[in-house]
Amino acid sequence: MHFYRDKVPDPPRGLARLRWYGPGLLWMLSAVGTGSILFTPRVASQYQYELLWLLLVVVFFMWVMIREMARFSIVSGLTMLEGMYSLKGPRGWAVWTIFIPQLFAAAVGIAGLSAVVGSALATFLPGSTTLYALLVLCACTVFTVGGSYMRIELFSRFMALILMAVTVVSALLIAPESKPILQGLAFSWPEESELYIIMPWVGTILAGSMGIVWFGYWTASRGYGGGLVGRERDDELPEQLRDEQNKSATQSKKGELKHYRISEWIRVMTGAATVGVVGGLLVIFSFMVLGSELLAPRGILPEGTDVAVDLTRMLSELWGAWGKILMLAAIIIAIGGSILANQDGWGRSFADMSLILARGKRHAKQRGWFVESIDWLESKTGLAIYNRTGLKRLYILLVTFLLPVIIVLLFRNPVQVMSASGIIAATHTPFIVVTALIVNRTRLPKRLRPGVFSTSMMLLSGIFYLGFAWLYCLRFF
């Protein structure tokens, strides 16, 4: 079965493409939070620029992976999760494998991120870390629940540009020499390496396992290739998407025009992906500079929320109040934007997974516990839960707001709890990468499938993350 959308609008051309790069900036905000703020300064404090080459390798793999996630949506009009649902085997096995563990990862991840923002605010304003963490959670939830995609994208553009400006300026102020940076491009490994410092950093550079999927959601929501085919309460796929209907038609002028337009949309998406990973790389490298130049000489290895405290203290010692304000702004924008983007991304994916798994069972005699649970929630809340937007808002409220609030209140340092969710990201990433490659190679028309280069790099990234997952699991258990 080949999925191929029926209609494709004209792609933007020339400078007009710049207006379509918002999904890249939104993805960047979702991606830089944990890896940049929590772990990069620690790695830099311990090893300075010695692992810069590893950062570049992971960033390249991330660029390859998010492009392939978005490719499926542009060609088919469906989400990658729809493609995974169509794979052979027990119905929905790939979606279930992702869905259940990610519920835990979402709640713990949001709680940890909000704790870091709370810590940053508590160093500058009167009040406790817990209080500010809860306030940030409330503010982000109100925005994501009440805002449309375009509002979220516009806000993310603004925050992403400020974040890049603040972090790059902060790094330039301490002006590191070029020699140690160039030495970091050589493939070398620290003689006394500590995996407990390196592995969480590698696993969170730019995006976790679900963060890879979200880029495809945001490009589709923006309207790339025509966006997602509307399917709010429908139980089945639209007829025109069940297969590449008329193969002779694809060889006609109309079919050639559609193929050309889709190829152009893929190029626009590639530009957005490049903006996202390059912007994220600039932010992460800036934090690597700050950790190498400010923390390493003093022998400071920050832990958890202390990252915010240590970095702001170091900058304030060098440049007074302005240094502290610069660093606080960078941390609050990076993590606050990451919370907002993660709430939207997890909400969308959970809603989509629920609708996919419930498909075809709402009117069946044997409806199952999952559909019964959704019906019960719909009757109790009064929300149109089978509507994608209503279901997304429900997941944002329950999984990325209520549960993180409970975690923040129960645990003294929710950042430590985040280490438990690392096992999910470590094991899910190679699974998602390989599964997505299978979907694109088997469910898309031959001419629009990933080529030899993209296929090879996806396989290589899957092997890379599989090895990383093995090491992570070995250490974790």
Image: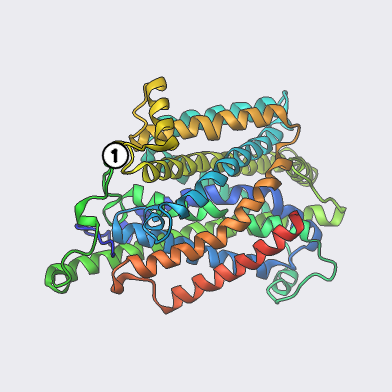
The image shows residue 237 at horizontal and vertical percentages of 26, 50
Against 474, is 323 above or below? Answer: above
Q: Which residue is depicted at the point 50% across and 70% down?
A: 458
Q: Name the residue under label 1.
A: 232
Numbered disc total: 1
The image quadrant of residue 286 is: bottom right
Against 329, is 229 above or below? Answer: below
- On the rendered image, what quadrant is the C terminus found in? bottom right
Front-most of 179 and 457?
Answer: 457
The image quadrant of residue 296 is: bottom right
Q: Residue furthest right?
A: 299
The image quadrant of residue 132 is: top right
Against 257, is 338 above or below? Answer: above
Please say whether residue 130 is visible from this viewpoint. yes
Front-most of 402 and 39?
Answer: 402
Q: Which residue is depicted at the point 39% across and 72% down?
A: 450
SS type, badge 1: loop
Q: Which amino acid does label 1 sit on?
A: Glu
Q: Residue furthest front?
A: 365
The image shows residue 201 at horizontal and vertical percentages of 68, 56
Crowd tier of the residue under label 1, counting other residues whose Cα lies within 10 Å: few below 14, some 14–19, many 20 or above: some
